[in-house]
Image (cartoon, grey):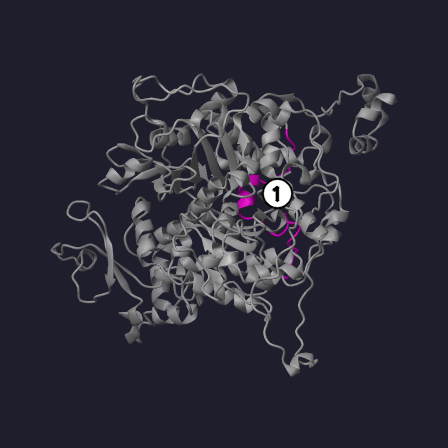
Amino acid sequence: MANFEGVDVPTVARWQSYDCKYGNSMMINFGVREVANSRATAAPGWAYVPDTGANASVTALQPSSRTRVRNQPTASLHETTAKQEAKILRELAALDRENHRDVSIPVPIRHKDSAGRVSHGKSTPAVRKILQSQKTFANHLSDFEALSTLPATSQPVVSTPATPAVRASPNTVVPATAAAPNVTSKGTRSHRKKDQGAVSTPTPLRKVSTASQSSTPLPIKSEPGQDIPMPDAPLLSQGNSTIPAPHPGDKDPLLVSRIPVMPSQEEIEKLMAAPPMTYNEARGPWVYEDRMKPIRQFCEVCGYWGRVKCKGCGGRVCALECLQVHQEECFTRYGA
Amino acid sequence: MAPPRRTKSSGPPPPANTLVLDNGAYSIKAGIVTPDVETPAPEIIPNCIARDRDKKTYIGSQLSSCKDFSEIAFRRPVEKGYLVNWEAEKEIWEHEFFDSKVKRHCDPPETGLVLTEAPNALPALQTNCDQVVFEEFGFARYLRIAAPTLNAYTDIQSIFKAPARDTASIATLPAEIFMLIDSGYSHTTITPLLLGRPIQSAIRRLDVGGKLLTNYLTRLLSLRQYDMRNDTYLVNEIKEATCYVSKDFKADLERTWKGPKGDRRAVFETADGIAKDYVLPDYHGRTKGYMRDHDPNAATKLKEMVKGKALGASEDVLTLRNERFTVPELLFNPTDIGLRQSGIAQQVMDSLSSLPMGLWPGFLANIVVVGGNSNIEGFVFRLQMEIRSLAPAECIVRVARPADPIVSTWQGGANLVKDEEAFSKLSVTKQEYEEHGAAWVARRFGGR
């Protein structure tokens, strides 16, 4: 067992939860950590990933309340039918496009004039792969999501032990108990305590890792203060405005002003040391107050308030005149 | 005349020049910064490869030589704010900076690089970026930094009007505490910054940006007037010229309504000055459109077409009414198009709700908006109004916009580079990259 002393403690603690088969292999292999699990085969360029059902690139655009843990399901104020949902999704996808038509614009081939071009030497295979990659952002995002839903054992990088998991990931497969309680149900005003978040320590989804970081098999120890040290006196200055002259009414309990206490140095440091959130976690929420408001409906023809509903398709129009315009198209569109 | 020889010492001196690149999805803000030399204003280069209808291809700044923007199509290497397609980006960078003929030429092995990225980037994309910068271009020194952070190195207090400051406090960079709202082409991000570093757990992103607004305006115009779906460039110009953020949405919408059939509203025709005409370019005599007050009696092509007359009018005019303010309204009410997110003001409050209460006054009193969308008329006013109504009554709410919100981030980068001590603490040299590897660099930039 002396061999284990070189291994850092949190890693060992993780391994203990797996069955003794792994424990044995650890003993035989000494410091070498076996990361492949029984189900997935790692191969360059592709991997089997668990299919969690929903299409990630679509749900990222418009996560419904069910996939997002932080957004508690509310009253059926904004319940939409599947048809309406599909329509909204389609329209949002159209609004997200770069060009109306599908175009592919190739990079122009340049004449290799030795005078005009700066050569950067030979590119390495890795760089050539990056340059030739035609992946879109949606591809990269679903790659990332697939990686983070993989079971924790298949990932070589160990997350920081004391990570404050402030927000929950939308595609969590882990039970939501770790993340849900510290989310305020009321959304905005209430002050969320940092310490609460720090309790839920080893969420496997917190780790920010990629397959391409495989050049460093060693676990990354997170020491936030090491790389970029905090300034020596980071407590905020108290401003430079002049203090107003004392007034006899200052002591009046009705006039006394309460200022919230500044967070301590420790608290601030903990706040700053939090690792970046993932792309999906950083997506701004639909807060409770806004969910309670009815969604504004607009006339599809002229843009005024949509006060009348078309019987055929449920689209909104403002008045009879616009309804007539709408129906000319509505009937042809739906063949009704 | 012997050529200057490079001395080979153990630690090469830091490169004299640094290329500061604010690599936005729509435009690159770029300039070469040298300490002790006054910095020129940055160039704003379209970050795209474009192709017009004659199949002619334009790279980056070549776009300004384009005469006919109808049906022009774009390929952008930056998607959703993140640098995704390196093939296209390399082409643009080489065309703009590394070609020996180009006027802002620089040689990567003798230059440093400051490159911005949007917050919450995917680690895979960050690794790609580091690799290309060092292994393909071979920059001598490199800093990849979230764009909001660079704004901490601008003098943000000078943006706010009151109260007057004493001169001693001016020089302290980075800024102590402020909240940055960056509303760009791909999205709007809200980043609270403390002592020049972002508070990662409080960053929020609203998926409404300039592109979505332009596409929405395109849809409205195509439904109501001309089919503009292939003229996004033109619609973007219309948007920039005519759109404004309404101070009173309901009243403005009321003013622009034509009224029911038998009861036409008199106010509709000019809508109290809201109705504007945009004269479209024809790309022969007129290459740029312009806005003017709506004239109900002017003869336009659309009118004559509707009435079936022979085309005699010389001008093609779009009349904009509620399109002018319903489009930027999406920044404040994304649910208007069914997007399940709260508006900017609520996102600011949500971001604050994850921070200790003691920091709220500091952030609320120092809100800075940058990015192209903040140029929309009335944006700052409306934002301040909405945050004011949501924030605790005791807090002062100040929202301000720098003189040029598009280059503000770049300016911060330039200021950072001039401060050699701070810059060298953050940046990574090529030697260090080769010594410690990509993962070390990623960790260092991540502040982890």
Whether residue B264 appears in this view of the structure is: no
Task: Give the x, y percent position of residue B226.
Answer: 27, 52
Residue at the far right in the pictured view: A1
Residue depicted at x 29% and y 49%: B227
User: Would you say B291 lies left or right of A58 here?
Assistant: left
In magenta segment, residue A74: yes
User: Would you say B424 lies left or right of B357 here?
Assistant: left
Residue depicted at x 65% and y 22%: A42
Q: Which residue is mark 1?
A: A276
In magenta segment, residue A34: no
Q: Chain of mark 1?
A: A
Whether residue B148 appears in this view of the structure is: yes
Task: Give the x, y percent position of residue B321.
Answer: 32, 63
Task: Give the x, y percent position of residue A324.
Answer: 34, 63
Q: Main secondary structure of the magenta part?
A: loop
- Residue B180, above or below B20: below
- Residue B96, above or below A183: above
Residue depicted at x 41% and y 29%: B90
- Residue A331, above or below A212: below
What range of the chain is rendered magenta? A49-75
- Residue A145 picture quarter: top right
Residue depicted at x 58% and y 44%: A280
Task: Give the x, y percent position of residue A227.
Answer: 64, 36
